[in-house]
Amino acid sequence: MERRLKVEHIDEKQVPYWTTHASATRWYRDVGPTFARNGKGQLKAIDFNFNCYGHCQPGSAEAQQKEGIDREIAGLAGAPTIRTELVSEGGNHDFNGKGTMIACEAVELQRNPHLTKEQIEQELLRLLGQKKNDLAKARYR
């Protein structure tokens, strides 16, 4: 990592490093917080529920162990946490930086069977401050 920062001419002193204690995992992108900015440009952290990629119930011991990671990282970053009942993973969200987000329809619907596609889209828009959200069906060739 240090070598990559030097190649990109990034001062390593400007990059914070943190150690979390909530749970050991390799998938911090998925269970960690999704960071966004509010209308005033202030950093916030979205605290999605986690269900072990559909293999455990939200609130189970396994899910709770990983569920603390997003709040711990948000605290280290000094960002307020925005809670939601939506079950989702950070690796399922992609942004274009111009107000549009894309997420995998199959993942979002499987994780939230009690919600319609429209309800999920509206909650993602509310949480992430995007203008447009597209739950896209994955196409494989």
Image: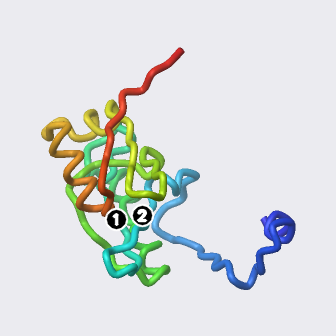
The residue lying at 42 percent from left, 80 percent from top is 75
Callout 1: helix, strand or loop?
Answer: strand
**Residue corresponding to mark 2:** 33
Applied colour scheme: rainbow
Disc 1 residue type? Answer: Ile
Question: Residue 31: where, in percent of width, then height?
Answer: 44, 55
Drawn side of residue 137 relative to residue 9, left or right = left
Residue 69 picture quarter: bottom left
Q: In which quarter of the image is residue 57?
A: top left
15 on left or right of 51: right
For label 2, the SS is: loop
**Mark 2 crowd level (few <14, some 14–19, many ≥20, 10 Å Cα):** many
Badge 1: how crowded within 10 Å, few (<14), some, or many (20+)? many
Front residue of 74/119: it is 119
Q: Disc 1 or 2, which lies upstream in sequence?
A: 2
Q: Which amino acid does label 2 sit on?
A: Pro
